[in-house]
Image: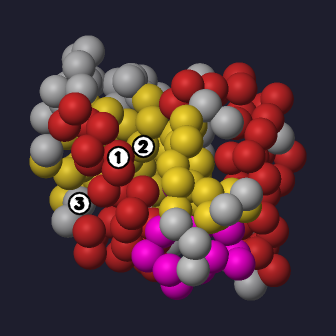
Amino acid sequence: MSELILTSGNDSSASAVLIAAALYLKSRGEPLWPESSLTPERLARHYPQGGWRVAWRGDVAVACMCLLDTDPLFWPEDSAGEALYLHKLAVHPDARGQGLSALLLHEAAREAAQRGRPWLRLDTATARPKVRAIYEDFGFQSAGQRTVKGFGVTLYQFPI
């Protein structure tokens, strides 16, 4: 297996990973994100290009995530600099089972520490126990639940 390289700022490659993951989950009867919301143009509306991290094996994008400095939609009470916020963590279906989610979570925690943030925070759908288990197994602690735009989400935080 070739070495894994992590790059930043590539929203078109992140889009390809996200769409592949969304289609895979949809085929299993576990839809997560509508593919139409994952095009580079749509992603650019909500996520800064510099926030994207894409994991590559050779010239193939195998996983991605986006790191944000603020997250007023899900964490409106947070003050500036309180946390680094993780969104859109995804692994390409062809790369499942290789520990890439944990690798990206370690990278996000490393970046949070590097930026002097005491927390790495994220949200995920409350009704997705498999995804929640990934975060809980990594060491994220539940910080509550809320409804955002009609969806029930669980908030998680990881101390840095």
- Left or right: residue 113 versus residue 49 is left
Image vertical order of residue 127 relative to residue 15, above or below: below
Q: Secondary structure at mark 2?
A: strand
What crowding class fits label 1: few (fewer than 14 Cα within 10 Å), some (14-19), or many (20 or more)?
many
Does the stretch in magenta take in 12? no
Q: Quadrant of residue 38?
A: top right
- Left or right: residue 66 versus residue 94 is left
Image vertical order of residue 111 relative to residue 28, above or below: above
Residue linked to disc 1: 108
Residue linked to disc 3: 140
Q: Nearer the viewer, mark 1 or mark 3?
A: 1
* Quarter of the picture holding the C terminus: top left
- Residue type at mark 2 is Leu
Q: Nearer the viewer, mark 2 or mark 1?
A: 1
- Residue at image coords 20%, 51%: 158
Q: Position of residue 52 (x, y in %)?
A: 56, 37
In space, the residues marked 2 and 3 are separated at their CA atoms by: 12 Å
Q: Position of residue 16 (x, y in %)?
A: 78, 53
Mark 1 vs 3, N-terminal side: 1
Image vertical order of residue 101 relative to residue 46, above or below: below
